[in-house]
Image (cartoon, grey):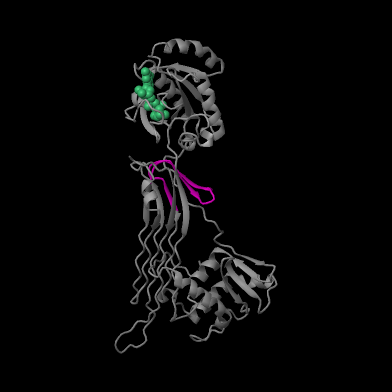
Amino acid sequence: MTTFVDRVELHIAAGNGGHGCASVHREKFKPLGGPDGGNGGRGGDVVLVVDQSVTTLLDYHHTPHRRAGNGKPGEGGNRSGSDGGDLVLPVPDGTVVLDRRGEVLADLVGQGTTFVAGRGGRGGLGNAALASARRKAPGFALLGEPGETRDIVLELKTVADVALVGYPSAGKSSLISVLSAAKPKIADYPFTTLVPNLGVVTAGETVYTIADVPGLIPGASQGKGLGLEFLRHVERCSVLVHVLDCATLESDRDPVTDLDVIEAELAQYGGLDDRPRIVVLNKLDVPDGQDLADIIRPDLQARGHRVFEVSAVSRKGLKELSYALAGIVAEARAARPQEEATRIVIRPKAVDDAGFTVTKETDGLYRVRGEKPERWVRQTDFSNDEAVGYLADRLNRLGVEEELMKAGAREGDGVAIGSEDDAVVFDWEPTVMAGAEMLGRRGEDHRMDTLRPAAQRRRDRDAERDEAAQAYEGFDPFA
Ligand SMILES: Nc1nc2c(ncn2[C@@H]2O[C@H](COP(=O)(O)OP(=O)(O)OP(=O)(O)O)[C@@H](O)[C@H]2O)c(=O)[nH]1
Ligand SMILES: [Mg+2]
């Protein structure tokens, strides 16, 4: 039996950026050439792309851990490391991407719709790229940044225009089989349908999709039968069709009560109230079927329902039904705001790229938050004094020190850059007046002493990181 998986948790890791290389050109009789360390390559992204030939999330159920390629480190001789390969994950049309708290990150509808679920880390600059008039031969390079890692949930919501709901064995799958070319399993026992079936119907000019869901029974909202779980698949439909069984032999059932029961379960599920509904009385080929329909039709119509009388077996009333559905679907499509043919959803940036904030915390610690300062810290090899000096310069140029001063920080106060659980902490020593001039000869930057304790912390963290990667994208050390 095939398994149907419509919800999976996926653990993704984008590729790490490769470290930049610190190297000095060497040639016979020219002992000290210029810096020639290349940049690290960029880590690959993890990208979800709608592929209509994919119909289930089964693959991800079996292999929930996915990694993109790491960037390669730069090398001497100005050789850049190659970029890590993107990891492209095909997903079915109608896949919803959520984070672990259930927030929707993206709703992927339409062939080719793409979502970058995890961004690869930038590669670190090599010392050649870091050289400037002031720093002619940098003895350091920048580290590659770690790629994003995150846990996401993929949920499949079938995209059908028409959804058939009803008791088990009401004939939902039978109707799909006669209205479309789909060949779902049909049998005279309840819960024949375990996963939604999808068919394509052509009625005149209109082409629409029709789906059934496993039969509902009283108490479905409490998990009876197959529960309401599958109703997720009808959430996107434009019209709900109640399939009522006019030939049921169960003494406590009749089509009108069935309708009430299903409506009550739909109400429990919620969110479907605004969907237009029509009522289909099925199995009118059986003896007394038509008589029963004649009795209940006025009641149903009095409730405002459009009622169709059909038989999936004799094919009575099917043409009228399919054209009526086409009409409702066409109307619903016209009413819907024009959707882009292909929706490209890219995760919005969480933080303001340009800014940073300085806040004083209760314990007297000053916390610096901001995309750039935090990134620069990640790029710093704290075992290299020059690299630490370079970081201090960058922070200074951005105005971090000035803001610290304004916030009341004094020499010796603790300053943390980064979030509570991932920060570099050091004792602050203002360098504003001196700025870049404080950079002495190689290895003599005295600011490094103040950053020392942080250095150890960074090294420990980096040690845990995947060593392999490297990639670099667009060079502007102060960008
Ligand atoms: N006589 C008659 N029998 C029908 C008709 N439509 C469906 N049936 C029979 O009813 C039984 C159930 O049909 P299905 O189409 O599997 O019903 P379903 O609603 O999909 O049922 P579940 O998948 O279990 O929810 C099968 O034995 C069908 O042959 C009809 O119009 N007339
Ligand atoms: Mg069925």
The x, y position of residue 59, in whole percent, is 36, 48
View quadrant of ligand 2: top left
> Is residue 443 among what the camera can see?
yes
> Is residue 206 among what the camera can see?
no
In depth, the one of 29 and 328 nearer the eye is 328
**Bounds of the magenta segment:** 91-116
Q: Determine the residue located farthest toward the left in the rendered image.
A: 28
Q: Is residue 104 above or below residue 279?
A: below
Number of numbered discs on residues: 0
Q: Determine the residue located farthest toward the front in the rendered image.
A: 251
Which quadrant of the figure has residue 410? bottom right
Tell me: 205 left or right of 97. Answer: left
The x, y position of residue 70, in whole percent, is 38, 64
In depth, the one of 303 and 358 nearer the eye is 303
Quadrant placement of the N terminus: top left
- As for residue 79 lying within the magenta part, the answer is no
In depth, the one of 455 and 204 nearer the eye is 455
The x, y position of residue 388, in whole percent, is 52, 78
- As for residue 108 lying within the magenta part, the answer is yes
In depth, the one of 300 and 42 nearer the eye is 300
